[in-house]
Amino acid sequence: NAGVTQTPKFQVLKTGQSMTLQCAQDMNHEYMSWYRQDPGMGLRLIHYSVGAGITDQGEVPNGYNVSRSTTEDFPLRLLSAAPSQTSVYFCASSSPGTANYEQYFGPGTRLTVT
Amino acid sequence: AQTVTQSQPEMSVQEAETVTLSCTYDTSESNYYLFWYKQPPSRQMILVIRQEAYKQQNATENRFSVNFQKAAKSFSLKISDSQLGDTAMYFCAFRFFGNEKLTFGTGTRLTIIP
C-alpha cells in the first residue's frame, strides 16, 4: 500500500515550458486535491476532484489545469510555466463520509521556474 | 470565506519543556473540523491531531493535546515533554463538515533546543 505518490520530487523549468505533475493513490479515495506551499503563506488549494470525471477550482487555479479520468490518478498540468509558479506542490486524497476525516498527503514536488 | 490565523511565525523551546502553539479561525458555521499538521524537514505532511467542533472534550494524542474554545474560535496545540523530533513546521487547518477542502494557517516553525 503506497498511499499517495507524486512524481517528480524535484523539477526545474524555464519560463514558458509546460509540464505535468503526477499524483496517484491506491486507497480508492474519491476525493483528490492539489495544494501549493509558499513561504509565509501556508498551503493553498489549486484544484480538487470529488470523483472520476469531476473537477473544480480551488483558491488559486490560474495557470493550472487538471483532469480525473480514473479514481487513482489526478495529474496537475502547468500550461506555460511562470516564475510565480515556483513552489512546493502537494497532492492529497481522502474518502469523504468516513469517520477518519484524514486527508493523506503525498511527499511533495519542489518546482523551480527560471 | 473562513480564515485561519497563526500569529507565531517561529518558536523555540528547550527539550522536555512544554510549548503551546496558537491558532484562531473565523467562520459563521457551527459544524466543522480542526486539525494540526506537522511538517518536518522531510516535507511530509503528518496529521498530529484533529478536533470535531461538536465535541466539547479536547482531543488528546499522547504528548499532544488541544485547547478548543469554540466561542472564542481558538484552537491551540500543546506539546508536552517536547522532543528533538518535534522540530518542524506546524500548520493549523480547518474544514467544514461535509466538505473536504482544507484551509491552512501560515504555519509556526518550532525548534526544540537540546
Image: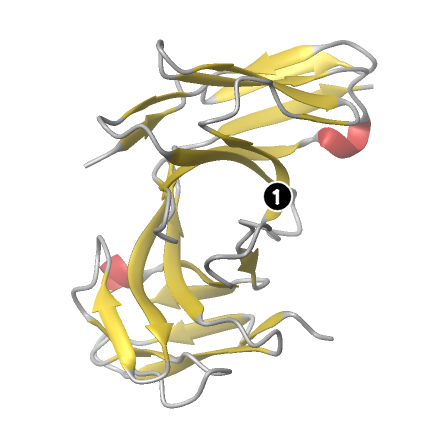
Is residue A81 or residue A49 the one in the foreground?
Answer: A49
**Residue type at numbered disc 1:** Leu
Q: Residue at x 25, y 27 (%)?
A: B27
Q: Residue at x 51, y 82 (%)?
A: A72
User: Horizontally, is A68 left or right of B1 in the view?
Assistant: right
Q: Is residue A64 visible?
A: yes
Judging by the rendered image, the residue that carries numbered circle 1 is: B47
Is residue B93 or residue A12 the one in the foreground?
Answer: B93
Color theme of the render: secondary structure
Q: As displayed, is residue A31 above or below residue B14?
A: below
**Residue B80, horizontal then vertical, whole percent:** 76, 15
Is residue A105 or residue A80 the one in the foreground?
Answer: A105
**Residue B56, horizontal then vertical, whole percent:** 53, 17
Q: As displayed, is residue A72 above or below residue B1?
A: below
User: Horizontally, is A80 left or right of B51 in the view?
Assistant: left
Q: As displayed, is residue A11 above or below residue B69?
A: below
**Residue A33, horizontal then vertical, whole percent:** 39, 64
Report crowding for label 1: few under 14, some 14 to 19, many 20 or more residues within 10 A (C-alpha). Answer: some
